[in-house]
Image (cartoon, grey):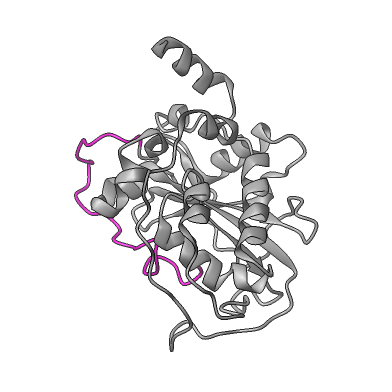
Amino acid sequence: MRWLVTLLALLIPQAAFAALDCSPPAHVAAPHSVGPSDTEPARQARVVGYTLALGWAPEYCHRRHGAEDAFECNGPLAHRFVLHGLWPDAADPKGWPEYCHAAALLPEPLLKANMCMTPSAQLLQHEWAKHGSCMAATPEAYFAKASAAFAALRFPHVGALAHDRELTSAALQKAFAEANPGTPPQAFAIMANRAGWLEEVHLCLGLDMRPRACPAGAGSADPAKPLRIERGSARPRSSPWRDGGDRDGGGSSRD
């Protein structure tokens, strides 16, 4: 049966296959509450579109792998894109709305229902409090919208692209566009760390949740610069330096 699972992984798009071989953990530890702060104030703004932020799990697990990351890094999700979050955009690329309403702790059933999409209870809590509260009346509605957008996306064979020593951000944008007919390459923003390793891919969406060209200020990597992709092994890299950003709050002011 192992050969069949491998064959399905190649034939079925990632979003569909995730439900096939991912089971949520039997128990999910309760997250802690999050809210606005001096550096992340509550902010209202007119929503003009959305960003679907996809994290490349192999890169995250390569540089940070503690007990709290075991579900993501020790199973089938460790070699895939996972959903970082669905974010509302404003006309000012740095003035997005955040922490629009007080957010209660998410119940365990809702956390478990979304762990195969976003494999961190604390990140789910963070995304609902910071972003979801500005675009949905309930966490159930927010995660349903995020899940639908994530499930609609198709992924190129990133593992094969990782072997290309001449890969650029523009080439990865093109690969995503080819995997999603009708979506322009400019709808994808490639996020790399300072050493040039892929961290995330952002899909820009309009108010109708259809792909749109990313606005100026979306922060995509230089399209002509080389891009490296972690394949998910424990081998040392050619450079000992790694970016130390924290996906839960230290790596990007937007997350």
Q: Which residue is outermost to the right?
A: 208
- Left or right: where does residue 251 sit relative to residue 170? left
Q: Closer to the camera, 63 or 100?
A: 100
Q: What's drawn in magenta, residue-wise?
A: 231-254
Q: Looking at the rendering, in which quadrant would you find the N terminus? A: top left
Image-quadrant location for residue 86: bottom right
Q: Where 221 falls versus 130 (above or below)?
A: above
Q: Position of residue 59 (x, y in %)?
A: 35, 46
Q: Residue at 51% across / 69% down in the picture?
A: 254
Q: Residue at 29% across / 54% down in the picture?
A: 68
Q: Closer to the camera, 159 or 69?
A: 69
Q: Closer to the camera, 131 or 216?
A: 131
Image-quadrant location for residue 123: bottom left
Q: How many marks?
A: 0
Magenta segment's dominant SS is: loop
Q: Position of residue 230 (x, y in %)?
A: 35, 39
In magenta segment, residue 253: yes
- Left or right: where does residue 166 sit relative to residue 224? left
Whether residue 222 is visible here, answered yes or no, is no
Q: Where 160 falls versus 210 (above or below)?
A: above
Q: Where 19 falls versus 128 (above or below)?
A: above
- Left or right: where does residue 124 sit relative to residue 25? right
In magenta segment, residue 13: no
Q: Residue at 22% across / 47% down in the picture?
A: 239
Whether residue 29 is visible here, answered yes or no, is yes
Q: Position of residue 130 (x, y in %)?
A: 53, 72
Q: Position of residue 177 (x, y in %)?
A: 67, 38
